[in-house]
Amino acid sequence: MAKALVLDAELSAAPRPGRVASAPERLDRLAGSALRKAVTGWFAVAVLGQFAFAAYLFGFYGRSALQGDWAAWNDVMPHGYVPGDGPGNALVAVHLAFAALIIASGALQLMPWIRRTWPRFHRWNGRGYLFSALLLSLGGLAMVWGRGGVGDLSQNVAISLNALLIVLFASLAWREALARRIDRHRRWAIRLFLAVSGVWFFRIGLTLWIALNQGPAGFDPETFTGPALTVIAFAQYALPLAIAELYFRAQRSRRPAAQLAMAAGLAVATLATGAGIATASMMLWLPHL
């Protein structure tokens, strides 16, 4: 009898075929769907833009290296090639090669269908991605403080902080993966992806700033110093990471208002990212291909 009563209660509580969802239920589904589509749209645009950046790295630096025209690197990267500095030049070459490769690796690592379909590939690609991220960050620190470059102390500090965040996020993503705390691992992996993308964010942010102001504003293009560059240097990772934290909060809250607001914010971010990719392609990447 008790089992029959429990079964009756479960059947009465179960949704009947043809049942019309209530307004709150429809709003919940709409908000969740809008948030998923918004973040997917931003990621798709960002991946296309990063592949454009990778094509530039391979097309310009790779072609120059194959032609033996190493000095051409100095046209776009001050101190990119220093005659007689074999170890330093090798460091820059390895840094650029890994920067191009890590773009494809990071994009594949965050694609859910690849993670579900090829879990073994996801694990090994993730290990390679973490190793490459650590190598890039340490190489970047060596280049900034040991080889010099453009910009002032504030920009060097911003780049160094970005490198340290990459090391931190990579370590935490690895720790959570080993502990099988998958949700936390994914959040740290997303933070790592955004931090690794800092140099890319800087380029699309800077060119978008120049386009909006119809020329350099807030900085000296000759010395490559000024308050605008300092802000962009810190914002290249601080802003994406802040948006990611808001997204995580909206995702966990499951409140329709928060999710719809976050979806709208991501839509704006997608438009800004697309505009930045367009300006960077026209100003920086395509002219050197």
Image (cartoon, grey):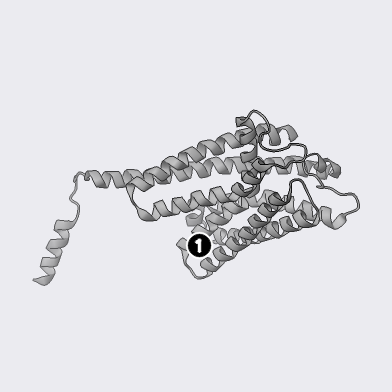
> Image quadrant for the N terminus?
bottom left
Find residue 183 and report its image quarter. Answer: bottom left
Whether residue 190 sits left or right of residue 3 in the image: it is right
Q: Amino acid at mark 1?
A: His
How many numbered circles does the render carry?
1
Whether residue 80 sits left or right of residue 9 in the image: it is right
Whether residue 202 sits left or right of residue 8 in the image: it is right
**Location of residue 271 with respect to 182 vertically, above or below:** above
Please say whether residue 117 is visible from this viewpoint.
yes
**Location of residue 175 with respect to 164 vertically, above or below:** below
Farthest-out residue, right? 84
Q: Where residue 64 sits: x, y (%)?
A: 81, 42
Q: Secondary structure at mark 1?
A: helix
Farthest-out residue, left? 1
Whether residue 111 sits left or right of residue 7 in the image: it is right
- Which residue is at a point 68% across and 56% down the rendered structure image? 160
Please say whether residue 32 is visible from this viewpoint.
no
Find residue 136 and report its image quarter. Answer: bottom right
Residue at the spot of label 1: 185
Q: 77 or 26, which lies in front?
A: 77
**Location of residue 143 with respect to 217 vertically, above or below:** below
Q: Where residue 68 sits: x, y (%)?
A: 86, 44
Q: Where residue 51 sits: x, y (%)?
A: 63, 42
- Which residue is at a point 74% across and 46% down the rendered structure image? 151
> Image quadrant for the C terminus?
top right
Q: Where residue 180 sits: x, y (%)?
A: 48, 68
Label 1 neighbourhood size at 10 Å, few (<14), some (14-19), many (20+)?
many
- Which residue is at a point 60% across and 63% down the rendered structure image? 168
